[in-house]
Structure formats: structure tokens, C-alpha cells
Amino acid sequence: MLFEKLKKLIDRQYYPLNRIEISKKKLIRNYRRLSSISEKIKVAPVLKSNAYGHGIVEVAKILDVMNPPLFCVDSLHEAYKLYKAKIKSNILIMGYVNPQNLKVKELPFFYSVYGLNQLKQILKYQPKAKIHIFVDTGMHREGILLDKLDEFIKNIPENYLKNVEGVMSHLSASDQPDKKETREQVMNFKKALEIFNKNKIFPKWRHIANSGGLLNSKILKLAGISNLARSGIALYDSSLRFITHINQIKKIKKGDKVGYDFTYTAKKDSLMAVLPVGYNDGVDRILSNKGKVLVRGIICPIIGRVSMNITTVDVSKVKNIKVGDEVEIIFNPKIKERISYEFLVHLNSEIRKVVVD
């Protein structure tokens, strides 16, 4: 009890140099917007990889009140975090689970499966678990190949058929709805459903779409074959801010070189700020001499190499700047070598998360 009181006191009085702000209002707005795309397709938030860097528990608590049909995670470890946080919504584990880890006690999770032995072992230890059968419709990662699906279904022990709650797949190029392979995947998913129906199995949930698939669901006519979409990146649009603070300001002269390997040379006399944040925190080294930050509403370039715990920026355009000023890191999706959410999932999970309105 004393320790808990002390911890709360420290938490109130401690001001972190770096913090991640999660906008409750924007997350809920995004969820409602995605849910309004099709009245026939429900939205299951994807919380894998620490909710795309936003904080898995923080995001789950915000969206739990929206009563989503499922939360989607990758691992048993992630599911257990939500379980301990007393999240009420159902949780689907999409990644592989070692069945040996299910022996200890009954858990209220749902599981994606694509192997008969995998299914049998999960239900041996978790007899009440719901199963979503993963079909490979052409992406050729995990999943049961279409020409093996009928045999797979016929070999499911009869007493386990009641546990089959869903059938799922994944689109490889959902942002390219007119691509031949994308349309073939949709047709293959339809064929998979026909195989289930032929075997008198009618899954409650049918899902192939991710964010892009949901946004393009009308073009792909998904409402006729699916009633659920797993939305990740579109859910998190503009809902996170990564804030750090200036810890030193110095003048550098034209010709001065900055950082490891001297990759930046000042073209003129400049004002430089040092930030207590680096690639350990999620500011990728690829942002060296490419990335940008926001200081008092002014965009400032990162100069020199991003170090493990330090980043340097040119703040010459900012008037009356001082040590302690807030700085927002901009994760630039225009860098060809990275996709926008690759930056987000690399955010250090130990950075303090703050939920704001």
C-alpha cells in the first residue's frame, strides 16, 4: 500500500522529457468513421504491435466502450495484457500460439488457426475457445490453401465444429482494388465460403479486409461475402503525437559539421537545438538529414545523424526559442524506404503514454 502511494506521488510530480499523447477523441472519431463505411461490415480494431505504437492497453480502454465485435492482436502475450487490464471485448489472436502455453488455465480468447493439429491442440487445452479458420486466398503467407480446404474441414472432429466461429483471410494489395490479384483473392474468399457452406458450416464472422480493404469495400463488393473488417492503420490516423523537449541550444557557424560521421555541414550560421531522443526511442536513423520536427508550429529539419538518445535540429526560424520548449517529432511517410506505421511500431514502449481529449 505504501509503495502504491509513493508511486502515485512520483507519477504526479515527474515530468518526462519524452511522452506520447494519444487522442481519445480522434480514435473514437476514426472508429465511428470506419464503422459508417458499410452498415453490413463491422470493424474490429487491430491492436497488435502495441497498437501500432500507441499503447495497447491505453487504446483498448478507449475503444472498449464502443463495444467492438473483436479486438485483434498478434500474440498470446498481447491478449494477456488486455485480459489483465480487464478489457471486456472479445480478443482474437491472429498469430501462432504455442499450444503448450494454453495448459495452465482457461482463457477467454479466440484463435486464428490454419493447421488441423494446431486446432486440435488449442481445443484440447481450451475447449470453450472460438476458432477463426485462416484461408490462403493468394497472398501465400499463413493459411490453408484453397484446394486443401475441403479436406481440412472434413477432418475437423465433429465435437469441435461448434467452436468454429469465423473464417478469415488477408488482402495483399488492398489499396489496389482494381489489381487482378486483389480481385482473384476476393473470388477465392467467396469460393472458400462456398466450401464451408457445402460442409454445412456457417461461420458467424467472415473477414478478409484490412483498412484498405474496408475503404475499398464497395469497389470490391465485400459486403456480399464479409461482415467484419480488421482495421489497423486507418484507425490510428492523426491520433498520436510524440513530444520531446529541447535540452540545449547553440549557435553553429557556416562550415561546422554536426553529429556522427560529420554527415551534415552548415551552409550558413545557424541556431541548433539538441533533443533528448533518438533511435532507441523510435526516431529512426533513416530520418538523419531527412526528418522534420515541429517547434512552436514551425517545421524544422533534423540535421546530422540521429543518435541512440540524441537528435539535433536546425531551429534558426523559431523566434525566442528556449531550453525546455516542446518539440513534436514528425514521422514523414514520404521517405521511400519506410511506410508511415513502420515508424510508429518502433516507438519505445517504455515512453510514457498520456491519453488526452
Image (cartoon, grey):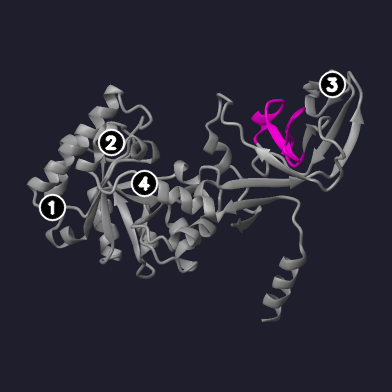
State left or right for residue 349 relative to residue 178.
Answer: right
Instruction: State the CA–CA distance, disc 1 to disc 4.
Output: 22 Å
Q: Is residue 241 shown to the viewer in this render?
A: yes
Question: Which residues fall within the magenta stretch?
Answer: 284-310
Q: Is residue 109 magenta?
A: no
Q: Which amino acid is tagged 1?
A: Ile
What residue does disc 1 label?
A: 201
**Mark 2 / mark 4, whichever is N-terminal:** 2
Numbered disc in front, either 3 or 1 = 3
Mark drawn on residue 266: 3
**Mark 2 / mark 1, whichever is N-terminal:** 1
Residue depicted at 90% across the width and 23% down the height: 269
Mark drawn on residue 83: none
Instruction: State the CA–CA distance, disc 2 to disc 1.
Output: 26 Å
State left or right for residue 4 relative to residue 23.
Answer: right
**Mark 3 / mark 1, whichever is N-terminal:** 1
Numbered disc in front, either 2 or 1 = 2
Numbered disc in front, either 2 or 3 = 2
**Up-down relation of residue 320 to residue 31 (above or below):** above
What residue does disc 2 label?
A: 218
Q: Are marks 3 and 4 in contact (CB under 8 Å)?
A: no
Mark drawn on residue 230: 4
Viewer-side residue, 114 vs 178: 178
